[in-house]
Amino acid sequence: MLPILDLPGVRDLLIQVTGRTGRAWVDRAGALQALPGWRASPERVRRIAVDLVSAGNRQLDELHPCADVAIGAGVRVHAVLPPICVAGAAVSIRLPAAAQPQLHRLIETGLCSGRIADELTALVSDRRNVLISGGTGSGKTTLLGALLDEAPPGDRVVTIEDVAELRLRRENWVALEARTPNAEGSGAVSLDRLLRESLRMRPDRIALGECRGAEVSTLLAALNTGHDGSAGTVHANRLGDLPARLEALGALAGLNPGALGRQAVAAFQAFVHLERGPDGRQRVGAIGRPVLARDRLEIGPLP
C-alpha cells in the first residue's frame, strides 16, 4: 500500500472492514477510487489501526475505541474499533499536500472567476482579515496557504493548526501545532493556548486553521488588537450558515450572539466560502462580509 501514498494528488487513504473483508479507497484529485487489488482480514485492519494510533502516542483499545492523532510531518490519522464501528475497524488517513499551490495556479485550475480572483488578491494587499469557510475537503487550508504566501516577504506569519498541514513558501514563518493528551491524559496544548502564545511572537499576520471551539474568542480578540492581514478557517456548509456557526462557537466561549456579532464585524473584513462541486473540483462559491443587523451577525456584499 505504501507506493499508493506516493502517487500525485492522493490526499486521503480510507481503510475499513466491509462484509468481513478489509478494503481500501483513496481520494485522488477529489474523487474516491477503490483499490481493487487490496484485501485484508478484519484482524489485520484492526492491527493497522492500533499501530498507527500507537505511533501517535495514543491508545486504541476497548476502553479507548476512537482516536485522532498526528504522525510525522502533517499526517492525520483517525481510527475507530468495533463494536463502535459495527462491521470492524475503520481507519482514515489524511496526507499533507506535497507543496503549497500558489494563488495564481489555483485560479488557473478553476478556483474562481477573474473578478473574484482580483478580490482575493486585494484582500491580501489591502491587509484585510479574512475568514474562509467551507465543508470537508473544500480546500480551506489550501486557499489559506495560498493567500498567506501572497503577503509581502517581510511580513512575519505565525500559523496555528491542530495538525500542521500548511506548507508556506516563506522564510519568516512560524508554524505552531496543537498537541493532544498522551496515554496518561496529560501534556495537551490547545489551539487557544497557542493563539495566546503567538501574540508574544511579534506576528504581522496570524492564521488559525481551523476554528472549532472556544478559541474563537481569543482569535477575535487578537484580530481586534492590530494584526491586520490575518486569517482563519471554519467549517460551514454554506456562506449563509456562517453566522449561526460562529454564534455556536462563541457560545462555547461564553459570548452571546450580540457580543459575537459585534466582535466579528470589527475583526473580519471578508468571508470567503469554498465548495466542492460534483466533479470534485474546489471553487469559491461566494464572498461576503460580516454586517450587524438587529444586533446579530449577518452576511452582506463586499463594498
Image: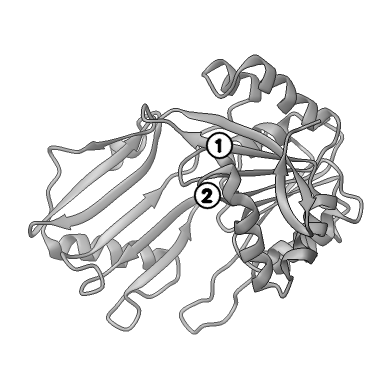
x, y percent for residue 124: 79, 31
Residue 111's disc is none
At x 53%, y 76%, the residue is 181
Q: Nearer the viewer, residue 113 or 244?
A: 244
* Label 1 Cα neighbours within 10 Å, binned few <14 / some 14-19 / many ≥20: many
Q: Nearer the viewer, residue 98 or 108?
A: 108
At x 22%, y 65%, the residue is 46
Mark 2 and mark 1 lie on one chain; the one further toward the N terminus is: 2
Q: Nearer the viewer, mark 2 or mark 1?
A: 1
x, y percent for residue 14: 29, 49
- How many marks the image carries: the answer is 2
Which of the image's four quarters has the C terminus?
A: top right
x, y percent for residue 183: 46, 80
* Label 2 Cα neighbours within 10 Å, binned few <14 / some 14-19 / many ≥20: few
Horizontally, residue 195 falls left or right of residue 20, namely right
Secondary structure under tag 1 reads strand
At x 70%, y 62%, the residue is 216
x, y percent for residue 79: 33, 63
Residue 73's disc is 2
Residue located beneath label 1 in the image: 274
Residue 161 can be seen, yes or no: no
Is 56 drawn above or below residue 282 in the view shown? Answer: below
Which of the image's four quarters has the N terminus?
A: top left
The type of residue carrying mark 1 is Leu
Seen as rendered, the residue at the extreme front is: 294
Q: In 3D space, how far apart are the residues under numbered discs 2 and 1 (Cα atoms)?
A: 25 Å
Residue 11 can be seen, yes or no: yes
